[in-house]
Image (cartoon, rainbow, N blue to C red):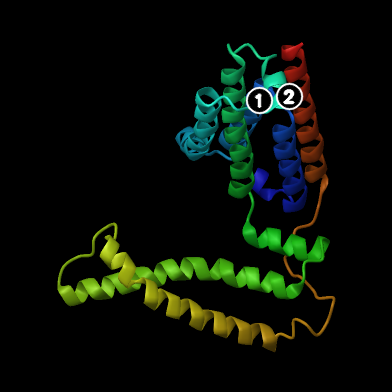
Amino acid sequence: MLSALHPLPKLVLCLAWIAASILVFDAVFQVATILVAALALVLAERRSPLLVLALMVPFALFGFGFLTTSVLFRQESDFALKMSSETPFGGAALSAGIVLFLRAIACGMVSALFALTTDPGRLIKALMLSWRLPASIGYALFSALHLVPDLAAEARQMRLARAMRRGRPPRRIPGPGEAASLVVPLLAYAIRRASRSAIAMEARGLGARPHRTVTGAPVMGRRDAVFVVAAVVLIGASLAAAAAWGG
């Protein structure tokens, strides 16, 4: 359901939610943000709960660094100590560390929610149509989107060709030596593709006209307005819950 929404309102709301997570130094608000993002992925997008938990792992490891720094070194700012002293997690250092730990996960999950529910092509088209993204930058981003999977396919073909010469199947995960030997051929392939893309973009005359027609660009509808209202209500409810818990 979230994948069908217009990318730009979703982008603005996710940025606003991340900004709120940074500004509101409260553990309840961070937990509410994590729950909303996780439930949206599981219920609205039908993502596996195990996938959602796996997404939290790198952000949790990043936040664990804040937690250990806050508890062991105890060099928080006066603002962090003042705000964390109002949370029931023991000492000020532990409270500040827990809030920072949860904030890292909350910001990461909101980012993951946007990334998993937004098609990059629709986002670029929406930026070109609504926010006047220059056509040269838009087509360059399109070329990069096509280049990344093509690089993976090219690397797979190179590994298969080398395995056929050796007469044995390729390893599932390339070793350090094999990975290093693929760098130069893939770099040459990327440069060749970039040169062809530059010629194609020049042939399109991207700098000749300021206004261009964008086909298949997303259009805002009623469901986007409903999504904006619901997201604003959720942010307000989370702030109210944090204020009530802290009060």
Neighbour class for label 2 at 10 Å: few (<14), some, many (≥20)? some
The image shows residue 190 at horizontal and vertical percentages of 48, 76
The image shows residue 176 at horizontal and vertical percentages of 29, 61
The image shows residue 90 at horizontal and vertical percentages of 58, 11
Q: Earlier in the sequence, mark 2 or mark 1?
A: 1
**Which numbered dot is residue 32?**
1
Amino acid under disc 1: Ala
Q: Between 218 and 151, which is closer to the camera in this rendering?
A: 151
* Residue placed furthest toward the left: 167
Q: CA distance from mark 2 to mark 1?
A: 6 Å
Is residue 43 at least partly visible in the picture? Answer: no
Q: Residue at x 16, y 68 (%)?
A: 168
Q: Between 55 and 223, which is closer to the camera in this rendering?
A: 55
**Side of 77 where 47 appears, left or right:** left
The quadrant of the image that shows the C terminus is top right
Q: Is residue 137 above or below residue 199?
A: above
**Side of 6 where 89 appears, left or right:** left
**Which numbered dot is residue 238?**
2
The reply to whether discs 2 and 1 touch (Cβ–Cβ < 8 Å) is yes
Q: Is residue 143 above or below residue 104?
A: below
The quadrant of the image that shows the N terminus is top right
The image shows residue 134 at horizontal and vertical percentages of 77, 71
Q: Residue at x 82, y 66 (%)?
A: 132
The secondary structure type at the circle numbered 1 is: helix
* Displayed quadrant of residue 74: top right
